Amino acid sequence: MYEKLTVILGAAMVLLNTSGTTVGQSVMGGVVVQYGQIGRNITLSCNNTGNRVAEWRLNDLKIIEARGMELTRTNLTLFNANPSKEGEYSCHDQESGNAYNRVSLMLGYPPGKPQVTCWSVRYPLNVACSWKLENKTYLPTEVNVTYRYGMGDVKICSTGWTMEGSCIIEYVNLFSEIPYTVKVMATNPLGFRSTFKQFIVEKIIKPDPPTDVRLSPISNQPKKLLLQWKPPVTWPDSDLFLLKYTIKYWRAGSNRPRMIEVSDQTSYTLSGLRSRALYFVEVAAKDFIDNGESSDWSPAVSARLWSN
């Protein structure tokens, strides 16, 4: 026997012929849109008078009771509903064929917990927060992002109907131990979920990778390579807010990279290398006084040592 766990979102479907709406439902052009969760049981009720036996149709085709559903005098129950059950349902008088009401059934999932990350890639100008829902809902889902500094006013960062996105918090307070709190709430007709993210600005500094990384041989220097790069293009002022860099390099065929850290410079000479070998290099950037995290690695570049 199927367990008759009936999911009726909001009030009963006897309200279908009114102008009101209920939780999980909306009315469009006289057709009620009812939302249900995939994998749950969905019950549709007919508002026929006199409790007479109703005839149910799906997309104007008569429904014959079969496995996975149950028909009673006035109700239609779909067990373990799946997307193939979506469509326009209607119940009719068996003699006249007149429709009592019509329901457009849409199936999906309530929103999962939003995943939120916040980084300051343009320190000290702003903080960027991004989010992504942990599941697809297959239903219209609104995401609202707000933030506040300490116990200050709540401000809107973003709002929209996208499953993932980002927003920018401008004019951040620097060198403060009072945290910012970001709230991301996702809402659809089946429910809502929210996530809170707290941060101190200096602890979430993460520059973008260095750009224009170049590695080249040095004439008459068979064991040296010249490495050059530029600060991240998104970093506002590398002269005022200094960066340090980590260089990772390795010889072709070796799985043991070496690391070198340099401060406030955009070139370095690698020395003591194996003659005529091919070397690969990546560079990462970090706040000069070690706040936050290092950037991701730049794309690897390569060069072969000079040979005459």
Image: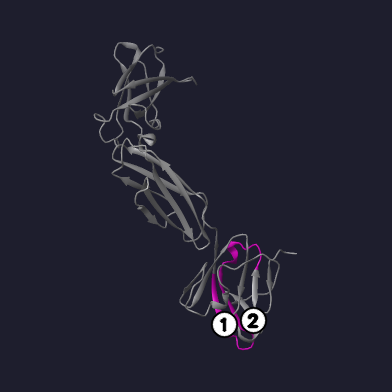
Residue type indicated by callout 1: Tyr
Picture quadrant where residue 160 is located: bottom left
For this view, does 159 lie left or right of residue 103?
left
Q: Residue 83's x, y, as percent?
A: 58, 62
Residue type indicated by callout 2: Ala
Q: Is residue 41 visible?
A: yes
Image position of 253 with respect to 40: above or below: above
Residue displayed at 50% across by 63% down: 189
Q: Which mark is residue 181?
A: none
Quarter holding the C terminus is: top left
In the rendered structure, which disc, 2 or 1, sits on the residue that comes first in sequence?
2
Q: Which residue is under mark 2? A: 54
For this view, does 102 lie left or right of residue 210?
right
Q: Magenta segment: does it hold 290? A: no
For this view, does 272 lie left or right of residue 229?
right
Q: Which residues are magenta?
A: 78-104
The reply to whether the C-beta atoms of the residues labelled 2 and 1 are less than 8 Å apart is yes
